[in-house]
Image (cartoon, helix red, strand yellow):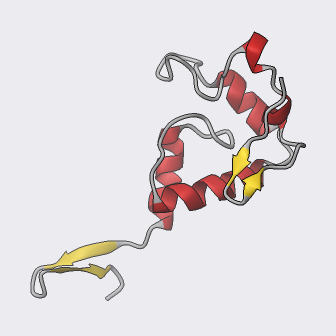
Amino acid sequence: MTVEPLGVDGPLPRTARCSEWDFATRGDPWFPDQPTAPLAYATAREECLACPVRAQCLAMVLDVETATWIGHGMVAGLTPAERAELVLQRRPRRFFDWGKRTLAPADQ
């Protein structure tokens, strides 16, 4: 069975390694039944790290998760916790301005 991994603007190129994965016989290592089990994502990480469109996939998921957190599954070789760290780095830092009682950019 061949799948088309979805990107923000449609499917990722057919050169994505996950597009050739046989989910029927090999299962789904990107969304394992027990994601906290040791080595749960090992196969997916190996496939992602060797994928020719990994950078495109990572850019897509970071754009999506910066706006709306999805937070599950292996994407572009990163677990939800690893992506969360990158998403937090991309978000503008803000602080609560007690005088104005509003959130303000951290660089003010």
Q: Give the vertical position of 26 relative to 55 (above or below).
A: above
Q: Nearer the viewer, residue 80 or 60?
A: 60
Q: Give the vertical position of 44 relative to 107 (above or below).
A: above
Side of 63 relative to 87 (left or right): right
What residue lies at 46% left-to-right and 22% top-to-bottom?
36
Give the number of callouts. Answer: 0
Q: Position of residue 35 (x, y in %)?
A: 50, 23
Q: Position of residue 60 (x, y in %)?
A: 66, 57
Side of 91 relative to 2 (left or right): left
Q: Position of residue 81 (x, y in %)?
A: 47, 41
Q: Position of residue 27 (x, y in %)?
A: 69, 16
Q: Give the vertical position of 20 relative to 34 (above or below).
A: below
What residue lies at 74% left-to-right and 41% top-to-bottom?
5
Pick the quarter of the image with the C terminus. Answer: bottom left
Q: Nearer the viewer, residue 15 or 99?
A: 15
Outermost residue toward the top in this view = 25
Pick the quarter of the image with the N terminus. Answer: top right
Residue 76 lies in what quarter of the image?
Answer: top right
Q: Give the vertical position of 95 relative to 51 (above or below).
A: below
Q: Nearer the viewer, residue 73 or 42?
A: 73
Residue 47 lies in what quarter of the image?
Answer: top right
Residue 15 lies in what quarter of the image?
Answer: top right
What residue lies at 33% left-to-right and 79% top-to-bottom?
106
Side of 69 relative to 16 (left or right): left
